[in-house]
Image (cartoon, rainbow, N blue to C red):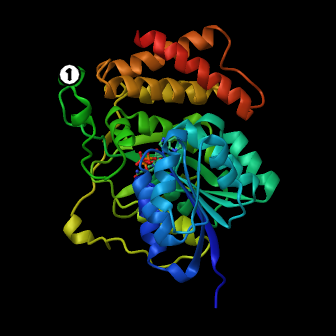
Amino acid sequence: MTERRRISILGATGSIGQNTIDLIARDPEAYDVVALTGGRNVARLAHDAARLGAEVAVTAHDDQLPALRDALAGTGVEAAAGEAALIEAARRPADWVMSAIVGAAGLAPGLAALEGGAKLALANKESMVCAGALVMATARASGGSVIPVDSEHSAVFQALLGEDISAVERVVITASGGAFRDWPLEKLAGATPEEAATHPNWDMGQRITIDSASMFNKALELIETREFFGLEPGQIEAVVHPESMIHALVGFCDGGLMAHVGPPDMRHAIGFALHYPERRPVPVERLDLVRLGQLTFRPADEARWPALRLAREVMETGGLAGAVFNAAKERALDAFIERRIGFLEMAAVVERVLERMSAEGGLHLDTVTLDKVRQADDLARRAADEAIG
Ligand code: NDP
């Protein structure tokens, strides 16, 4: 009999968190759930924590604690709230931790889980964008490890199994093109948050879906690829692939390309990370290649999607540029969702913040620490708010 594994899910109430719960709830004998964390959706958090028999449920928001306590009364699940409680829960000994909080808020809890020596399944791409070197160094120091969950990075990771990274010439990550891939350029300025939050292929959280339409999501993923696999910016490219069946391709020095093909269902990448280094059955659709017929590709046009050009600059700059880029993007996205700026203004705001902080010398740094990332994040948010006006 295999031993039960202790697992925690950070961001359990979100899209990735719920897909993770879907997988583990199918095999309740295999797992002991340590911590589930969420934000404002305390009803869902309490429901899942009770049915999975979690040790502790944590909401990120102090004002939600009374509601969480009420919902968990009589279940035996401990309730807690706030950032310190979240970090304490993430640090509780666990074999496997899913990092699926959205945004830079996911960095500190993910690092705490790694410090506890866990295998960290990383969906929170912002962690790698803001502090990739720190995440990897923390894993090395604690004996923990990081397994990518973003579908593109899981695809690259899988294509690299048994390969030598020095034989890699290039990595191509694919982009669906998001909600506006076929819109005429002149219509984009008037795009609404509701229109941007509709994805042609993937069913995801609101913020990442809008980031797909603006390609900020792909921009983050380009940076994440550099950080995860230690590649040079010139070795990484994005291509539009409207069918979202190939997630990434790895090109080797002998001219061969290894492509990872699978249905657009995050449970594949989550299941891979959950069972790695083994492969176990995962309940996703099996592709019918004949019915699929053809797979198509288009250039990822940097004039249509300026976020891709900015990502290239961030990769070249390194240091704190990723943290600044992400923080400015998060504020610009908030402003777009609240209808304070238009769709195209998001990239303009981020570019202005990068230029300003670069001119002030605020991007360069030899060793990235959590404190430095937090400071840069804070300054970039303030600069973005000023740019938004
Ligand atoms: P969702 O918005 O669906 O869920 C986000 C989760 O984070 C929720 O549990 C939410 O709680 C919680 N949360 C929100 N704000 C905070 C905060 N300040 N502190 C602590 N917890 C917070 O996001 P997704 O599941 O779509 O994405 C999660 C991460 O995974 C992101 O980094 C995303 O880029 C990445 N990712 C997502 C994919 C997808 O298919 N969805 C694919 C690949 C990567 P609540 O809802 O209760 O407020």
For label 1, the residue is 190
Q: Residue at x 68, y 65 (%)?
A: 94
**Viewer-closest of 159 and 215:** 215
The quadrant of the picture occupied by the N terminus is bottom right
Q: Residue at x 49, y 37 (%)?
A: 220
Q: Residue at x 54, y 63 (%)?
A: 158
- On screen, residue 256 versus residue 204, left or right, reads right
Look at the image and tell me whether residue 311 can be seen: yes
The quadrant of the picture occupied by the C terminus is top left
**Viewer-closest of 71 and 33:** 71
Q: Position of residue 207 (x, y in %)?
A: 38, 39
Tally the marks: 1
Q: Position of residue 51 (x, y in %)?
A: 46, 71
Callout 1 amino acid: Gly
Q: Position of residue 337 (x, y in %)?
A: 32, 29
Q: Is residue 270 above or below residue 199?
A: below
Q: Residue at x 29, y 20 (%)?
A: 342
**Viewer-closest of 87 and 122:** 87
Look at the image and tell me whether residue 229 can be seen: no
Element under disc 1: helix
Q: Is residue 261 above or below residue 240?
A: below
Q: Residue furthest right?
A: 141
Q: Quadrant of residue 331?
A: top left
**Viewer-closest of 304 and 100:** 100
Q: Position of residue 226 (x, y in %)?
A: 60, 41
Q: Is residue 289 above or below residue 114?
A: below
